[in-house]
Image (spheres, rainbow, N blue to C red):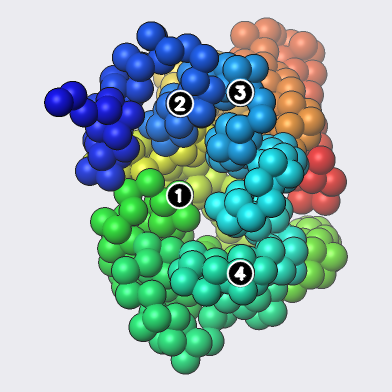
Amino acid sequence: MHSDPVDEALEALEDAQPEVALELLTGVLREEPYQGHLFALRALILSDLQRLEEAREDVTRALETTPDHPFVHYAAAMLALQEGRVDDAIAAARAAQAIMPDYHDAMLLEARAFGTAGAWADAARIARRVAEEDPENGEAAVFAAVAESVGRDGMLDPEKWQRLSERFPLSATARAAAGWTRLRAGGYREARQDFEQALALDPTLPWAREGLVFALKARSPVYGLLLRFFHWSGNFTPRTRNLMALGAVLAYSVLRRQGEAYPALKPVIIPLLAAYLAFMLLTWLADPLLNLMLFARPDTRRLLQQDERRSGLLVGGALLTALVLVVTGMAFKWDGGLRGAFGVGFATIAISAVFLSRGARKRKWLGALALIAVCGGIGAAALGGDLSAICLAVSVLATVISTWSTRFGSAA
């Protein structure tokens, strides 16, 4: 008696053997290319393995082959959310529900997309509805509680969490929720254990994998301080955070002018200005640099999403280029090399800004600015005279516009 290769593929997924599942599904699809839901399943496996281009091809094939299958639209929503296309994820999740109104997985995926966009009230509303319709759905109950807490004050009530963990002891989502709660409270070691337990229960849970990446980064004391700052500032409205950022810029300008007007104050003012600049650089570059460190280790590389890998490699490459230009400029007394090093090094902020945006149009705009900034820095090194100064000015201006667009522009 021959076993069904699709059943074998599903068993391989349960045993955390995605490559085996891929091989089995590929064999079936080679003989039965009309099974769109299997293309959708293969797309989810490929996306989990960060083979996103292949996943996109399979989703497209699935939608062309079986456009009336709810799982096909669910897979499209999952891929869109993984790539940061939140609006597309919501639309695809709703398309799945239009075909199957009680498709709870698609409803929760829509809730996750709203949470990713910061619309926690909508996320909580959808998750509560699923929890009411399916009281045994641990993911819905936990996500509803987390969404309500984030929308309120960012903290999950310990007693409420205790009741949820007792009710769903084997829920990977519940363990991940505990990790995020502890992460926000500064318990990074405990959070890491929770995320690892969640991944042991469900190796494919993105929420747990993202949390584990944060917990691993938090081993750096500097990054831990940054996380505490971001958690604290996250309690304010976007408008308040923007005003705080503008206030910091104005304070920096006032202190700098005071230092120029009263030289006796420079021993106090200069360290303050240096600390401010260092902090600002860290807020932009800490994530991509720690991503690069995690990418360098085989045991943590698999945890990184495609954007995290790209940000680390691109920022690291730009900094290495800047370092080579500095060393060359100092060794050969080459002023152009030093100007180019400053331009390319400063452009790393623009590169980092690209990966802070989820909107496709804005990301293209920020990517163009980052390319201009890097090319301007290289031009400052390669060209001489006035052209070198002009290229450096263009590079700095592109980076400044990029940071301004990221902090104060729209999210589209």
Q: Secondary structure at mark 3?
A: loop
- The mark that comes first in sequence, 2 or 4, is 2
Q: Which amino acid, by three-letter code, is at mark 3?
A: Thr
Which of the two discs, 1 and 3, sits closer to the camera? 3
Q: Which residue is mark 1?
A: 206
The residues tagged by marks 1 and 2 sit, at their Cα atoms, a distance apart of 21 Å
Q: Which residue is mark 4?
A: 133
Instruction: Give the residue number, with chain letter if any, for mark 3.
Output: 66
First in sequence: mark 2 vs mark 3 = 2
Query: Label 4 amino acid?
Result: Glu
Q: Nearer the viewer, residue 89 or 251?
A: 89
Query: Cα distance, mark 3 to mark 4?
Result: 28 Å
Q: Amino acid at mark 1?
A: Pro
Measure how far apart labels 1 and 3 are at the Cα level: 26 Å
Figure check: 62 above or below 141: above
Q: Label 2 vs label 4: CA separation?
A: 28 Å
Tag 4 and tag 1, C-beta contact below 8 Å: no
Q: In the rendered image, which residue does mark 2 sit on?
A: 38
Image point (61%, 23%), residue name: 66
